[in-house]
Amino acid sequence: TAADLAAMLPTLAGYKGAVTVSDTITLAELKAINNATTGAITLVTQSGALSGSAADILAAFKGIKSYEGAVEVTGTDYKLADLKAINAITEGAFTVDSPIALTGTAKDLAAALDGVTAYAGKVTVTGSYIVDDLKDINTAVDGDVVLANKKVALTGKIADITAALTGITDYTGA
């Protein structure tokens, strides 16, 4: 079981073999297993919801390419890059329980917040941006979306541009 592996593997110094976990795993168990082996980890059951700090989630998923269960980042000790890295692994629901202000490019913000709903933190978009990225950001964010560069030309369908600029009041266009 995951619990047995999490308890046993740390006692085997330098274990390099592959590990297959067949039952539902907790974040603490996955982190312990990942810290105890350099071998590949296969999760047969990927439906369990995992919740924890961004640092613990990233440590637990080191070397794991995807996870289908729900993942929740707790606390406020995370950065945009952490959310982007976690979201790249997560195929299930992805939530952030304590939104903070995030600043970054539209591409990075869209990647970090993909699939997130009701992110209540302030989001500041730096640099240039395109309609699709702003739409993705607006879909995820219930808080303020601020454009550092308010004069980027946007092209696309009127409905898409409207969706991209929903809630953004100071866009001036090119």
Image (tube, rainbow, N blue to C red):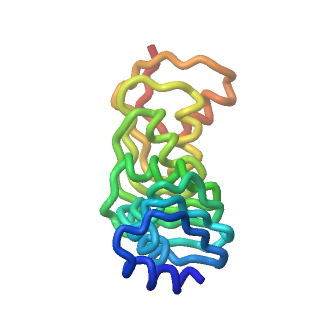
Q: Nearer the viewer, residue 126 or 85?
A: 85
Residue 155 against residue 69 in the figure, above or below: above
Residue shown at 40% from the left, 19% from the top: 151
Q: Residue 97: x percent and y percent? A: 45, 67
Residue 1 placement, left or right of 105: right
Quarter occupied by residue 116: bottom right
Residue shown at 53% from the left, 56% from the top: 64
Q: Residue 48: x percent and y percent? A: 62, 74
Residue 106 against residue 20 in the figure, above or below: above
Q: Quadrant of the N terminus?
A: bottom right
Residue 124 against residue 49 in the figure, above or below: above
Residue shown at 35% from the left, 57% from the top: 100
Q: Quadrant of the C terminus?
A: top left
Quarter occupied by residue 154: top right
Q: Nearer the viewer, residue 90 or 109?
A: 90
Number of numbered tags placed on the structure image: 0
Q: Residue 80: x percent and y percent? A: 38, 47
Residue 81 placement, left or right of 61: left
Q: Residue 105: x percent and y percent? A: 40, 33
Residue shown at 35% from the left, 63% from the top: 55
